């Protein structure tokens, strides 16, 4: 059995773009190393969660690591709260939150405080909330944590009994469909009242959860609206962070059977974002600590390639999640996305292929979802896959791209959960 180097380029998949001469960023990019892997290997495509589902990264990563999100996912709230260091017990209400700007009638002026609330400011506001807000509608305690910029997490624990995640969002921009958070296309821009979701109207755990969210919303608004940081921002003509918008409620962490038991493989992971880190930890996949970003992508990628060559000796496989292409795609910047793909090819795959023995390992490259630059958002478009090395025989793929992958011998996988079992078969050839 060969070692498995499993590389995911976040948001890699795309569609043809006019400004790139009708090519996708991956097609337009110079990628001699990934092209070589494709030529010596096989290609194909997959729906990372399923056709018709434009997934957030968290659900997609769970799926392409071989766990059906319909079975295991319990919402973004619990996962982000856990990843940001908050304790989430069964029956705790865990939410993903945003600081936002509202007027006195709670009309939302900006969902993200003009995107310029610093993490430092947010931390001070969070401290004031933790200190001054007391929840009494149902006896309960809470922990509120700001993470990056306007983002944060909230975990509420009832003193007696359990709370239920079956509650609607106060954030009007998102719907809650089962455990999934879904962005709405049209919505009234007013803070919503949390309510039990359909079918849970008579469940005391959901009724209490909704009560607590509404009480937290009211009381935190009072604390935030008169906080010195916001008074200062107001006097400087900046938007104020005076509202906490709640969404993606859940009431327990996912219970993944350990990756090692499920697939018989001892994997380690390189992950950048807290949520992906949380997922890996919950799956029992070891985390390889990465040096903090240096501001120089090329340098960071070379370092990662070296760490991969080192660490593959100790494990059956590595899951390497590289955030690079997703961000420029959200900004609609196809040229930058192309450049980032080139930097990854040159500075990650270059040194990796120089030092990795492809007789003893297979390398796979794919994505967690497509983020087409023209949509500036995740879509359900299938992502390209390449698998190379070991005893894999070439299937005639000439390069790595969405179009070439359409004709590759892997075909089109209907679900991301099929992918790890496929890798295992290829590693045993
Ligand atoms: Zn992603
Ligand atoms: Zn994204």
Image: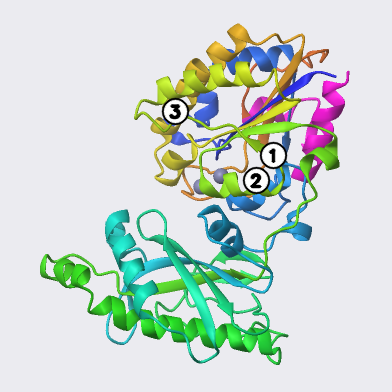
Q: Nearer the viewer, mark 3 or mark 2?
A: 2
Q: Is residue 123 left or right of residue 45?
A: left
- Alpha carbons under labels 2 and 1: distance apart: 6 Å
The x and y percentages for residue 96 are: 51, 65
Query: Do the numbered discs 2 and 1 sit on residues whose CB atoms are within 8 Å?
Result: yes
User: What residue sits right under mark 2 in the picture?
Assistant: 281
**What element does badge 1 sit on?**
loop
Q: Is residue 364 left or right of residue 28?
A: right
Ligand 1 position by quadrant: top right
Residue 255 versus residue 326 in the image, above or below: below
**Disc 2, ligand 1: is the CB inside 8 Å?**
no
Q: Secondary structure at mark 3?
A: helix
Residue 206, compared with residue 393, is above or below; it is below
From this viewpoint, is residue 118 visible? no
- Number of the label disc, if any, that sits on residue 340: 3
- Assess whether residue 267 is covered by the magenta stretch: no
Label 3 and label 2: CA atoms lie apart by 28 Å
Q: Quadrant of residue 133?
A: bottom left
- Mark 1 highlights which residue? 285
Please report the bounds of the magenta region as a residue range: 402-429
Q: Is residue 169 visible?
A: yes
The x and y percentages for residue 342 are 47, 21
- Say few, some or many: other residues with alpha carbon within 10 Å of mark 2 (under 14 / 14 to 19 / 20 or more): some
Q: Main structural element of the magenta stretch: helix, strand or loop?
A: helix
Q: Tell me the residue at 44%/81% (across/down).
A: 216
């Amino acid at each position: 059995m060969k070692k498995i180097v499993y590389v995911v380029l976040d948001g890699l998949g795309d569609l043809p773009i006019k400004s790139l001469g009708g090519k996708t960023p991956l097609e337009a990019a110079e990628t001699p190393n990934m092209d070589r892997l494709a030529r010596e290997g096989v290609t194909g495509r997959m729906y990372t969660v399923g056709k018709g589902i434009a997934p957030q990264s968290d659900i997609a990563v769970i799926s392409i690591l071989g766990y059906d999100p319909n079975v295991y996912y319990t919402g973004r709230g619990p996962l982000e709260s856990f990843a940001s260091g908050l304790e989430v017990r069964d029956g705790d209400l865990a939410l993903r939150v945003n600081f936002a700007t509202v007027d006195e009638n709670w009309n939302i002026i900006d969902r993200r405080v003009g995107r310029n609330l610093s993490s430092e400011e947010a931390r001070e506001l969070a401290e004031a909330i933790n200190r001054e807000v007391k929840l009494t509608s149902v006896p309960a305690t809470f922990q509120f944590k700001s993470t990056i910029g306007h983002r944060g997490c909230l975990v509420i624990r009832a003193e007696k009994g359990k709370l239920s995640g079956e509650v609607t969002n106060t954030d009007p921009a998102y719907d809650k469909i089962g455990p999934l958070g879904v962005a709405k296309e049209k919505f009234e821009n007013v803070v919503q009242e949390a309510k039990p979701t359909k079918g849970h109207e008579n469940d005391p755990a959901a009724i209490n959860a909704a009560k607590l969210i509404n009480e937290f919303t009211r009381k935190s608004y009072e604390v935030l609206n008169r906080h010195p940081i916001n008074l200062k921002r107001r006097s400087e003509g900046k938007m104020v962070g005076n509202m906490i918008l709640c969404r993606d409620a859940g009431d327990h962490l996912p219970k993944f059977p350990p990756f090692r038991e499920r697939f018989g493989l001892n994997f380690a992971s390189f992950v950048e974002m807290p949520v992906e880190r949380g997922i890996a930890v919950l799956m029992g996949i070891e985390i390889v600590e990465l040096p903090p970003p240096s501001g120089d992508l090329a340098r960071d990628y070379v370092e990662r390639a070296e760490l991969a060559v080192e660490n593959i000796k100790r494990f059956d496989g590595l899951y390497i999640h590289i955030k690079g292409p997703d961000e420029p795609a959200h900004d609609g910047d196809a040229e930058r996305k192309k450049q980032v793909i080139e930097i990854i090819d040159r500075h990650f795959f270059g040194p990796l292929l120089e030092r990795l023995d492809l007789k003893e390992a297979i390398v796979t490259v794919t994505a967690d979802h497509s983020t087409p630059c023209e949509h500036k958002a995740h879509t359900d478009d299938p992502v390209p896959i390449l698998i190379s090395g070991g005893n894999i025989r070439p299937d005639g793929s000439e390069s790595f791209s969405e179009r070439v992958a359409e004709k590759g011998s892997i075909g089109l996988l209907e679900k991301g959960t099929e992918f790890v079992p496929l890798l295992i078969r290829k590693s045993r050839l």
